[in-house]
């Protein structure tokens, strides 16, 4: 059984992002980039399924610029067997990524596609759902537990007020939530081993996919700065200010 895992190269979650002065987007020059944290969880889950003997091959895929190879090498160091880079310098929006992944699903025929629930750069939370729709596959989003057996995936997902358990017939798309697992640290020997694992590069044209953006970003702006607070002498003044200044009472 083969698992396909989507990994996106994003600004590292520790970096405080800066908006470009012309308001067209986020400045990524000289900024540390890493694997999207939810995708690390997806790779970890796929590798655990392989270690448990449920899965025979883990294929990592990234769509984006040539530097996404580094992200794929990290996936290989965690334990993926091989990687595919769908190289494009276009601004790849979720629909374009979903179409590329659909084309790769047709080619690779995986039994399970594991993606993150969202990319922390655009917070879209769309790709898994769009892929499932385009490929006519069952989907379970925000997975906090995945059990694969006898051609089915049993997925627990956190919902308001409790946990929901779904049974999906494979092949299926599952997106990962934070509580699914804790990804391992990549060790130096595994980083060295990952350098020798196969990494294939293809282009959207090879898959016959048009990745032209469909959405136009009008403006990106920093959130307004918080103004300094004031200390009030007593509750009476506080209530007064809430009524007359904040107008929340
Ligand atoms: P999004 O819908 O953009 O929030 O992304 C959800 C998930 O889709 C991510 O966590 C990844 O697993 C996958 N994904 C999104 N963009 C890419 C990409 N460029 N390359 C590979 N996987 C991606």
Image (cartoon, helix red, strand yellow):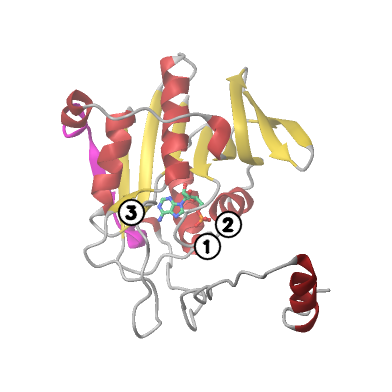
Q: Position of residue 157 (x, y in %)?
A: 68, 35
Disc 2 or 3, which lies upstream in sequence?
3
Say whether mark 3 is within 8 Å of ligand 1. Answer: yes
Which element carries disc 3, helix, strand or loop?
strand
Q: Residue furthest top?
A: 53
- Residue 42 magenta: no
Marks 3 and 1, Cα distance to the nearest angstrom? 15 Å
- The residue pinned by badge 3 equals 86
Q: As displayed, is residue 149 above or below residue 207?
A: above
Q: Which mark is residue 95?
A: 1
Q: Nearer the viewer, residue 116 or 150?
A: 116
State whether residue 107 appears in this view: no
Q: Nearer the viewer, residue 35 or 114?
A: 35
Marks 2 and 1, Cα distance to the nearest angstrom? 8 Å
Label 1 crowd (10 A; few <14 / some 14-19 / many >=20): many
- The residue pinned by badge 2 equals 126
- Residue 197 magenta: yes
Say whether mark 2 is within 8 Å of ligand 1. Answer: yes
Disc 3 or 1, which lies upstream in sequence?
3
Q: As displayed, is residue 65 above or below residue 102?
A: below
Disc 2 or 1, which lies upstream in sequence?
1
- Closer to viewer: mark 2 or mark 3: 2
């Amino acid at each position: 059984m083969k698992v396909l895992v989507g990994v996106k190269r994003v600004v590292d979650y520790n970096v405080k992002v800066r908006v470009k002065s012309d308001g067209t987007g986020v400045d990524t020059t000289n900024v540390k980039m890493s694997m999207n944290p939810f995708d690390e969880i997806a790779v970890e889950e796929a590798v655990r399924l392989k270690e448990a003997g449920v899965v025979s091959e883990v294929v990592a895929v990234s769509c984006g610029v040539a530097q996404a190879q580094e992200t794929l090498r990290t996936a290989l160091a965690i334990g993926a067997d091989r990687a595919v880079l769908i190289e494009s310098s276009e601004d790849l929006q979720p629909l374009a990524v979903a179409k590329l992944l659909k084309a790769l699903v047709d080619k690779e025929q995986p039994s399970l596609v594991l993606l993150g629930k969202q990319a922390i750069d655009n917070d879209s939370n769309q790709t898994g759902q769009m892929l499932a729709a385009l490929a006519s596959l069952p989907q379970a989003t925000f997975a906090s537990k995945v059990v694969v057996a006898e051609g089915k995936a049993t997925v627990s997902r956190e919902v308001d007020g409790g946990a929901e358990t779904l049974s999906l017939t494979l092949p299926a798309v599952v997106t990962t939530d934070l509580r699914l697992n804790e990804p391992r640290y990549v060790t130096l020997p595994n980083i060295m081993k990952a350098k020798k694992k196969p990494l294939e590069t293809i282009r959207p044209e090879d898959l016959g996919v048009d990745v032209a953006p469909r959405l136009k970003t009008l403006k990106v702006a920093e959130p307004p700065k918080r103004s300094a607070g004031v200390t009030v002498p007593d509750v009476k003044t506080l209530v007064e200010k809430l009524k007359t200044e904040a107008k929340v009472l």
